[in-house]
Amino acid sequence: MREQPNPGTPADSADADERAFVPASEILGSITSSISGPSTALPDPASGDELEDAAHARLARKRTADEAFARQMAANPLKPAEYDTSPLAVPPRGLPLMPASEIDGASTVSENMESDKVGSGRPLTGYNAQNESLDRVRVDASGQVLTTNQGVAVADNQNSLRASLRGPTLLEDFILREKITHFDHERIPERVVHARGSAAHGFFECYQDLSDLTRASIFSEPGKRTPVFVRFSTVAGERGSADTVRDVRGFAVKFYTDAGNWDLVGNNIPVFFIQDAMKFPDLVHALKPEPHHAMPQASSAHDTFWDFVSLMPESTHMLMWIMSDRAIPRSYRMMQGFGVHTFRLVNAQQESVFCKFHWSPLAGTHSLMWDEAVKIAGADPDYHRRDLWESIEAGIYPEYELSLQIFTEEQAQQWSFDILDPTKLVPEELVPLRPVGRMVLNRNPDNFFAETEQVAFCTAHIVPGIDFTNDPLLQGRIHSYVDTQLTRLGGPNFHEIPINAPVSGVYNNQRDGMHRQAIPRGRVSYEPNSLAGGCPFQAGGAGFTSYPEHLAMADKLRGKPERFADHFTQARLFWQSQSQIEQHHIVSAYRFELSRVQTQAVRERVVSLLANVSMDLAQGVANGLGIRVPRAQQVVKPLEIAPEVSESPALSLFARPGEDSVRGRRVALLVTDGVEAASLHSVLDMLAEEGAAPRVVGARLGVVRADDGSVIHVETTVEAMPSPLWDAVVVPGGEGIQLVLSSYGQMVEFVKDQYRHCKPILVLSDDPVLLEAAGIPVDMPADEPDPALIRLRAERSQEDSVTALAVSVASFREALARHRNFLRETDPPVV
């Protein structure tokens, strides 16, 4: 088809570059149309103001501004940089054009209309209200009437609409339907792993300028504070499972930095079961309740888990940690956190070092005992969640120190292990910890679902100055953690949920999707553009740039590096670094777990793995299972390994006792009628002054009468809060009190469990009746005095009695600060 001639007069090139301005009234039709326009004329900006219709005047100004923006960008100025092959090339910064007036970047010239819904009619440019604090979404109903979700006041919230008092409910009852429908959809899919969690807000404070190591802004100056949200979790159990099961604990920190959100998604154990993300679904399927009968819940003590890990010898190191007391922490306040993987720190000069992240609690690292953990799971399944909440409410803010292990690629190449292997750690003897900041958790969430449940942690969320390594498990997590939110939180806009929104600005061309919250202003949703002045523009060197790692040319393949094949050296290091008490607990944990396994061949296979770690360990477990130690499982690839470290004291929980403090420690003061008031109040005053949490515990709620006639109010009972929920017990003095207490079976059991769990016991009397009823020996098994069992001796004079009480209380305080006296423990228990 022949092209039709243009009936108009074509402009020459000079005219095309300098179009004529004409009075806006001459091209008013084009100004008010959203299709096409003249090729040779633009509305004169000055004449636009002369238009009688204000809307036409604004259209004229906008039309002129759009043209001016577009004409300033004859071509894409960033395009040549796309073809710069230099590995150190820094992406160029975009060249934005700023609008002359607010209308220039508007979606509509009618945006100056104001209402209670659309706003003031004066939109702020370069601003995203979603990045303001959570105050913008908090709701408080004080003094307000009940409404529907559409804001309609509800007259009657007690009765549905019916056709007569005894007639059917009417379909037109939109208030009932809305309420029931919303209720029916209140639950969202729980996390596949880490479903059970608890969280808190706080801050991270940097100790020193680390700009020589990293561009990360949170490390840029001493004293700089960054808001954080931290979620602790178990891994295996469902959302309603118990807190104190034997399991890995998640330790995920979301830093709301001024350069974007950084998620450090770690655990309380520095290594993992597997070396490649390819095996993660298999691991979790084996760990979860067995699919034919959905048992057991939140437990690894079953056949499928041990069948899997016994065929995956690389899991041996992680299994040592899981079977240790690390897997049953006393509190989230008293456990370490680790980034698990090796990361990179990158500075402004694109220089990089490797890094491992460590969190250390100021309260020290302390654990439960297994018998205690099992009983707590029944008495208070929310034990860790409650402890975290109550501590923050009481002003006992959990605090952790962040330390880094920093090393170079050259150092890593010299070591006997591969730093990209997530089943390995870097011993502190090789690379000491460098403290760089502290984290304080000082605010509980307002709403569990809105914050703790909807928060989305993703290992892919990093900021300039922090980068990934080629750890094959980390590489898989980068994808998986983002992907899982799409189902759990309903689509790609989960970043707009308030708890996930950054405090730094979010400006991009991503649009639409389920549950979109933001209302983007303007008509441009692409880059490059000229119609929005090139905005938002790429940040260039100020933005995130990946470290230009040199990669040797090689074949595409599936496989593992040679040093990944060493599966037992670091497991042996962990075992040899534990105290005798901790080693005993590891053997007991293996014995318990494998005793619940039904398949004998699986039990034997596990012990054959342990024979490669330590014959003492393997023999101890085999004895508990009533089997002989089988031949050690053959190593997958014999390697000549000369480990740099054979024992690392830092791997023991006892290496970090924490502050010499009793703050937050729960102490039960047992009472009944006739208790001695003076000594009881002395202990109570000391504990309160030291920041502990003493409570008066009786057989029933109500009051008891003390020996001086005073009334003592019972705060809780041995039935509501049994012994495992307490850190220590005070047994009262008073004539005949021991005999009375020993007549209550629950009181006897209470004291017995305190002793069995190696906790401090203060007896404000030299009467041994209650101790004898509980079968508690005065001395420890080796006939040595028990420093955590303090008995107040009767003295002849009042002065000596006061002194004796003061000494006993001080000894009790010291024992309480040490948490437990493990030397009391026997297997099987004598009490």
Image (cartoon, rainbow, N blue to C red):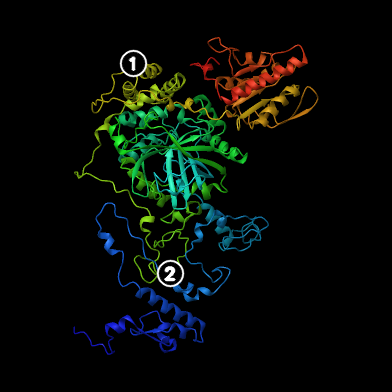
- In the depicted view, which residue is nearer to us: 385 or 333? 333
In the picture, the disc for residue 628 is 1
From where the camera sits, is residue 745 visible? Answer: no
Q: Residue furthest right?
A: 709
Percent across and percent down for residue 190 are 45, 45
Can you say whether 545 is above or below 421 in the image? below
Residue drawn 54% across the image and 41% down it: 440
Percent across and percent down for residue 44 are 42, 84
Query: How many callouts does the rendering have?
Result: 2
Instruction: Look at label 1 and name its amino acid.
Output: Arg
First of labels 2, 1 by sequence position: 2
User: Which residue was labeled with disc 2?
Assistant: 98
User: Which quadrant of the structure image shows residue 157?
Assistant: bottom right
- In the depicted view, which residue is nearer to us: 117 or 161? 117
Q: Nearer the viewer, mark 2 or mark 1?
A: 2
Q: Secondary structure at mark 2?
A: loop
- In the depicted view, which residue is nearer to us: 723 or 539? 539
Instruction: Look at label 2 and name its amino acid.
Output: Met
Can you say whether 44 is above or below 476 in the image? below
Percent across and percent down for residue 207 are 49, 41
Instruction: Report, in whole angstroms, how far the alpha carbon at label 2 lies from the one at label 1.
Output: 79 Å
Residue drawn 41% across the image and 56% down it: 492
In the picture, the disc for residue 30 is none
Q: Dot 2 surroundings within 10 Å: few (below 14), some, or many (20 or more)?
A: some
Can you say whether 390 is above or below 114 in the image? above
Percent across and percent down for residue 218 are 46, 47
- Whether residue 192 sits left or right of residue 17 in the image: it is right
From where the camera sits, is residue 818 visible? Answer: yes
Q: Split into 4 quadrants, where in the image is the N terminus?
A: bottom left
Q: Split into 4 quadrants, where in the image is the C terminus?
A: top right
